[in-house]
Amino acid sequence: MGVQGPQLPIGTQVVLRVAGTDGPDGAVRRGATGRVVGMTADGRYAVRLADGRETVARRDQLTLRSAYQDEAIELGRPDGYRLVREYTIYAAIVGSRAFGLDTEESDTDTRGVYVAPTEAFWSLAKPPTHVDGPEPEWFSWEVERFCELALKSNPNLLEVLHSPLVVRQTALGEELVHLRTAFLSQLAYQTYSGYVLSQFKKLETDFRRDGAPKWKHVMHLIRLLLSARELLLEATLVVDVGPYRERLLMIKRGELPWNEVERWRLDLHQDLDDALRRTVLPGTPDVATVDNWLRSVRKRSLGDV
C-alpha cells in the first residue's frame, strides 16, 4: 500500500503519484493535479482534477503538490553517517554522565561537531545540518549550525563545549574549544530561564492531570537553572552539578514534594535575576570572532571531498 501519510482535508491541492487511476472519463495520467473534494465509503479520496474531471485515489497514490515538485528535483543527498565518521572535529559525552548525575542505568550520550567539505555546499543537495547516528546515542551538528545555535546560548550546545568527557578532538576541534568563551553572553538568561519557565507550565499540567510530573525532566530543568546561575555569576559554564547531586537525584526519584521543588525553582529564578544585574558577561556573544573562524574553516576544508 505504500506510505499513507497524514489525512488530507478537503481543498488540499494534490498530485497523482501513479498513472492509470480510474476516472469516469478514462485513465488519468501520473502527475495530474487536482483538489480533494471528499472521501468515498471505502476510504479513498475524491479528487477534482484541473480539467474538471473527478477521480478517486488511495492516500498512498496522492502527494502534496509542493512535495511532488521537491521529489522531482531531488538529488542524492550527502551521506550524513559518512560525514560524521570522516569529518568529526570534536565530540564529547553529555547528559547525566557529564553532569555527575549518572546511575547504573544511565545511557552514554555523545554529541559531536563535523565539518562538511566546502565543495558540498556548492551543490543543490546541501549537507545535512545535523545527523542522528550512526552510533546509538550519538548526535552531531554541522559546524555552521552548531555555531549558530551556540551563539544563541542553547544549553545543549554550550554543554558540549564544556563537557569534561571529551571523546574526539582534532586540531580544528581544539580551535573550537578555545573559542567557547566567545559564545557566552547574557542571552543565556533568556534562553535558560525562558525554557525552564515554559517547560514547568507543561509539567504543572501533567501534575494536575496525572498526580506526578516526569521527575527526570524536572531534575534536569532545576539543573539548568543552577548552571545558568553559575554562568552569569562566574562567566563560565560548569557542567558537573557537584554538591547538588543528591538533592537532584531525590527529585528524579520523586522523593522531593512538588511544592518544595517549585519553591526551589522560584528561588533560582530570583537568583538569576540578581545574577543578571551583576554579571560580567557581555550583552551579546562575540559573533565576529566566531564568524571569522568559520570562514577560515571553510577555506581550509576545500578539497576535502
Image: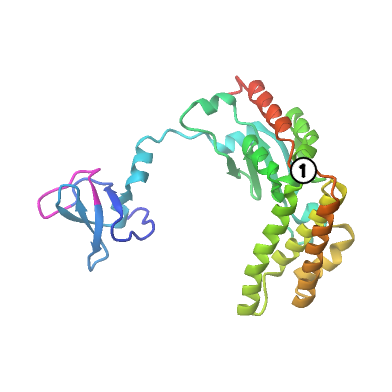
- In the image, 38 versus 216, the foreground residue is 38
**Boundaries of the magenta span:** 22-34
**Is 152 within the magenta?**
no
What residue sits 74% from the left and 50% below the top?
A: 188
Horizontally, residue 82 falls left or right of residue 245, namely: left
Above-or-below relation of 220 to 210: above
Q: Quick check: can you spot residue 229?
A: yes
What residue sits 76% from the left and 41% below the top?
A: 167
User: What residue is disc 1 on?
Assistant: 184
What residue sits 71% from the left and 28% below the top?
A: 293
- In the image, 183 versus 70, the foreground residue is 183
Give the amino acid type for the residue marked by disc 1 in the picture. Answer: Leu
**Is 27 within the magenta?**
yes
> Residue 278: percent from the left, percent from the top?
86, 51
- Which quadrant would the C terminus be assigned to in this image? top right
> Residue 144: percent from the left, percent from the top?
63, 35
